[in-house]
Amino acid sequence: MASEQADFTGLDRAAVLLLSLGEDQAAEIMRHLGPREVQRLGVAMSKLSRVSTDQAHAVMREFREKLEQQTALGLGASEFLRGALTKALGGERANSLIERILHGGESSGLENLKWLEPRAIAELIKLEHPQVVALVLAYIDPEQAGEVLHFLPERQAGEAMLRLAALDGLQPSALRELNEVLEEQLSGDSQSVQVSAVGGPKVTAEILNRVETALSSSIMEHLRAQDEDLATKVQDQMFVFDDLINVDDRSLQTMLREISSETLILALKGANNALKDKFLGNMSKRAAEMLRDDMEAKGPVKLSEVEGAQKEILQIASRLEAAGQIQLGSGGGEALVG
C-alpha cells in the first residue's frame, strides 16, 4: 500500500470513499448494507481525522481503477452483484443482502432485530424461553450475538448457548411464529421469513469467539457440565488467537493489510514469542523494526485491551475466510501485560 494509505484498513478506505462522495450518495449506498456493516462504517467515519487531500484522492483512484477493471457495465449486473457480494461477505451473508437488493421488500421482525443495539435485543428477549433466545442468537450476526450475551444473566446465556449448539434446523412454521411475535413487539411490517439451517456447534463457536474470555469460558463450562460431547464439538470449531501460528504466510500477509498498527501492537503484547515472530516475519524489515519499537514504547497495557485487539483480529480473519481470501485452521481488577 502506498505510504499515503499505509495506516488505512479496508474499512478505513471505505469510510474515506463514502465521505468523499457526499451525504446523499453515501446514504444511498449505505441503504443497501446490513446493520453491522453500517455500524462499522459509521464508527470508522467518526474516527477519521485529518485525512489529507492526497489520501482521499488515492482512495478514489484505487476505487476507480478497480471499477475500470469491470467491463460491460450493466450487462449481467445481477450475476456480477451476486459474485462480488459472495466474494466480499461469504455465501450466507451475501444471499441475505442480495435478496433485499434485488427483490426489495420490508424487513421482517427477525430482520429488524439486526438494527437494534445489543442491550435493546437483550431486554426484548431476557424473559423468553432459552430456546427462543437461542433462535434469536442464531439469526443475528455472530458479533452482535456476542454483544447481546453480555447483557443477559449468565445462567440464561449458558442455557441459550447449550440449546443453540444442539440446534441443527428449524421448521418453517416455528420460524414464522417467532417472526410474527417479534413483529408485534417491534411494530414491524409482515414478511415471510426465508428458512435456512440455523444453530449448531459452528454458529455457537462463532459467537463465543466474539465474547470476552471470561464469559466464553463460563459458557463452555456450562456446556461441558450438560453435554460433554456437544461441548467438544463446539470447542473443535473455535478459533483462538494462538491458532494463527498455523495460518500460511500468504493468508497472514492478507490479514496484515486489514489490521491497523495500534490493534496489532496491542494484540501482540499478549502473544507468545513464536506468534510474534510469525507476524513480524511476514512484514518488511523496516515495518517489523518499527513495530518492535512501538511495542516496547507502549509499556504495560490492560489485559482487556489485549483481548479486545485479539478478538478484532480474529473477526477480520473470519471475515476474510468467509470471503475466500484466506484459509484458517481450527483450534481450540485487571491484570497488566508487560
Image (tube, helix red, strand yellow):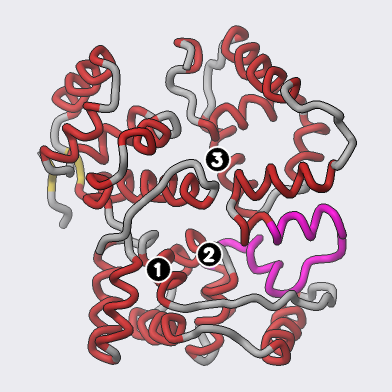
Range of residues picked out in magenta: 95-119
In the visual, does 157 lie left or right of 227? right
Determine whether the residue tagged by mark 3 lies in a helix, strand or loop.
helix
In this picture, residue 253 sits left or right of residue 284: right
Q: Is residue 145 magenta?
A: no
Relative to residue 24, is residue 79 depicted above or below?
below
For the residues marked 1 and 3, what is the alpha-carbon distance in whole angstroms? 21 Å
Circle nearer the N terminus (3, 2): 3
Q: Which mark is on residue 219?
A: none
Q: Point out which mark residue 150 bears.
A: 1
Q: Are marks 1 and 2 in contact (CB under 8 Å)?
A: yes
Instruction: Out of 271 and 198, give the one closest to the viewer.
Output: 198
Which residue: 69% across, 42% down?
84
For mark 2, give the secondary structure: helix
Q: Position of residue 29 (x, y in %)?
A: 77, 39
The residue at the point 29 percent across, 90 percent down is: 227
Instruction: Return the x and y of residue 256 as percentages of the image width and height.
Output: 38, 32
Horizontal placement of 40 versus 331: left or right?
A: right
In the figure, 185 relative to 260: above or below?
below
Inspect the image, locate mark 3, and give the three-letter code of the amino acid beneath it. Answer: Val
